[in-house]
Amino acid sequence: MLTVQILITLALGIFCGKLYPAARLWQAADSITALALYALLFLIGIELGQNRQIWHQISTQGWRILLLPCAIATGTLAGGGLAGWLLAIPVRKSLAVSSGFGWYSLASVMISQMGYVELGALAFLVNILRELLAMLCIPLVARYLGSIPAIAPGGATAMDTTLPLIAEATNNEGTVAAFLSGAILSALVPVLIPFLIAG
């Protein structure tokens, strides 16, 4: 259902953009999206602060909790770099696009606001496709490879949109690990994108 809602919203946006290209709303789009992203980051912070199970898991596992998101980030960036090389896209730009880790709303807006509008559109498509593919792959990966590997396809979305699917396909340990991994990857997105674009 979520996938259908995303696709319908995107289709409506394209339709409205074609129908009313000079509307005042579109001129204010940058400010609106920036405020929405700040609100989203604030709410993620509240969710992290209130979840006691997460902090207990962090305190018991220590530095080992970083292994899963580090492995996911490494694999994602390696895949993004390879795809960029195959498509003749500069390495830093392809790495910046892939460092959205599935968080299409933040990655696309950040890259666009830095002056790379076409690259921002690519980031949107790449990261939304990752989320859609994750929704298809997570149950299969959980069934054949196990709970922990099933977290990887979701990337940053493992803490929100794909978390219910991971919870259904795995167990309590997988659910907590997914939330932690998604939270860490989400925190990396606004750090990595400017670093890779500006570098």
Image (cartoon, helix red, strand yellow):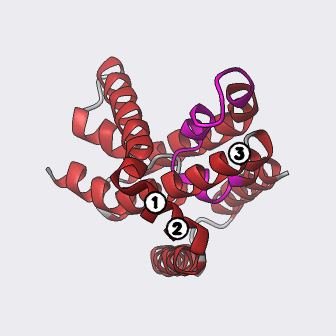
Residue 141 lies within the magenta run: no
Residue 118 in the figure: left or right of residue 166 = left
Q: Which residue is mark 2?
A: 56
Q: How many marks?
A: 3
Q: CA distance from mark 1 to mark 2?
A: 6 Å
Q: Badge 1: how crowded within 10 Å, few (<14), some, or many (20+)?
A: few
- Please report the residue visible at 31 percent of the width from the left and 29 percent of the height from the top: 81
Name the side, left or right, on which 116 lies relative to 153.
Answer: left
Q: Tag 3: Cα neighbours inside 10 Å, few (<14), some, or many (≥20)? A: many
Residue at the far front: name it: 60
- Callout 3 touching callout 2 (CB < 8 Å): no
The magenta segment: 142-163
Query: Tag on residue 60?
Result: 1
Residue 73 lies, in percent from the top left, at 38, 41
Report the amino acid beneath label 3: Ile
In the rendered structure, which disc, 1 or 3, sits on the residue that comes first in sequence?
1
**Tag 1–tag 2 contact (CB < 8 Å):** yes
Q: Residue furthest left?
A: 199
Q: Which residue is mark 3?
A: 166
Measured from the top left, where is residue 169 in percent x and y? 77, 39
Which callout, 1 or 3, points to the residue nearer the camera? 1
SS majority, magenta: helix
The CA distance from mark 3 to mark 2 is 20 Å
| Depth order, front residue of 18/60 | 60
| SS assignment at label 3 | helix
